[in-house]
Image (spheres, grey):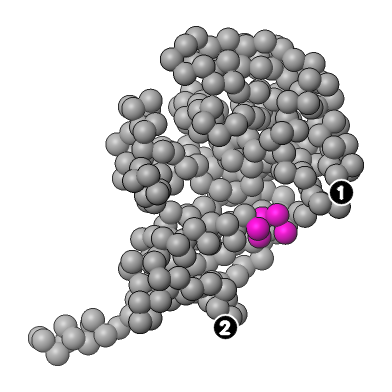
Amino acid sequence: MSRLADARRAVKVDFEVIVRTLRRRITLRTDSSELYEAARYLECDPEIEGYASEESLVRLEVSDGIHRIVERGNVLQQQLHSRELIEFLYANLFDRSIRDDPTLPIIHGACLRRNGRRLLLVGDKGTGKTTLTLRLMLAGYEVEGDENVFVYDGGAVARPRALYLKEGSLRLLPEIADTISRRPSLQDYHGQRIYNVNPRCFGAPWRISHGPVDLVILLRSNHGGYSSIRPVSSLALVREIVPEVGFPADRHGAAIGALVAMSARTRGFDLSLGDHPQAIRCIEAACSSLD
């Protein structure tokens, strides 16, 4: 029996994690259980409509205490610790996403659908965008993404990426906190866990498609206070969105044109985000104004 057990231990089993950009489906493969658990923080495999996906393979290896990323026989990065390797991969996936559509501006915002209509939530980090996105999911909205949205003349499309929720926000989502706490996570430099979640964790679909934007909601944090909403003009909407946009280096004018075209076709609102039930009622009222 000891010989059989030794033989089993000698067989290396490959683990796989799938990550996505709009045009690429990337398999992260490793025979290291440590690297597999770390790489699960990047898991992302939504249904993506309207884009052909190129398959590619990236190997994660560890040898003599050195962690490596290998693609097509080339070492892309090596680090002493798995965490630093995953952080490099996180940034690398963003770069690959940008290279998919390098001429498009990209907004820092969440993208959701409701009854066939698409709305964007745009705001600075720390405004509570991810928590509100999950709250809206529980209220029946379909979540496409909560971090980046590419804008083109005909509309927008979310960048494939899991939702990342900080440990401190679990108290704001007591109904699903237990499910979230069992998801893959990474500990930040302050010792706080950040969880990888997506709509499928809660039995909801996760589909990304491109199309027109019907509603843009600008988020202003009002933690602990009331939520209220007011309409904004198309001009004010463009002015407020621009600080949250990453522009392609050599196509600034065309990118501004795409933002102006999107804003001219959509309704804009400014939401003071405090109490979540009130905020959802405000968003429902904004959606109803489109009828």
Q: Where is residue 205 in the image (x, y as percent from the top left)?
A: 51, 40
Q: Where is residue 98 in the image (x, y as percent from the top left)?
A: 70, 54
Q: x, y (%) of residue 78?
A: 49, 73
Between residues 199 and 246, which one lies in front from this camera angle? 246
Is 96 in the magenta?
yes
Q: Would you identify the image quadrant in which residue 194 lies?
A: top left
What amino acid is labelled 2 in the image?
Gly
| Residue at disc 1, secondary structure | loop
Residues at marks 2 and 1, CA–CA distance in whole angstroms: 34 Å
Q: Residue lying farthest left?
A: 1
Q: Is residue 95 left or right of residue 35?
A: right
Q: Quadrant of residue 62?
A: bottom left
First of labels 2, 1 by sequence position: 2
| Few, some or many residues within 10 Å of mark 1 (<14, 14–19, 20+) | some
Residue at the image point whose x is 76% and y is 40% from the top: 151
Lateral position of residue 188 relative to residue 178, left or right: right
Identify the residue at horizontal 85%, vertical 31% (top origin): 260
- Label 1 is placed on what type of residue? Arg
Residue at 67% x, 10% y: name it: 230
Residue shown at 47% from the left, 26% from the top: 135
The residues colored magenta run 95-99
Disc 2 crowd rating (10 Å Cα; few below 14, some 14-19, many 20+) is: few
Residue 30 visible somewhere in the drawing: no
Disc 1 designates what residue?
251
Mark number displayed over residue 82: none
Query: Quick check: 32 left or right of 290?
Result: left
Asked if 247 appears above or below 224 in the picture, the reply is: below
Quadrant for the N terminus in the image: bottom left
Residue, disc 2: 73
Asked if the residues shown at circle 2 and circle 1 are in contact, with their CB atoms under 8 angstroms apart, the answer is no
Is 277 in the magenta? no
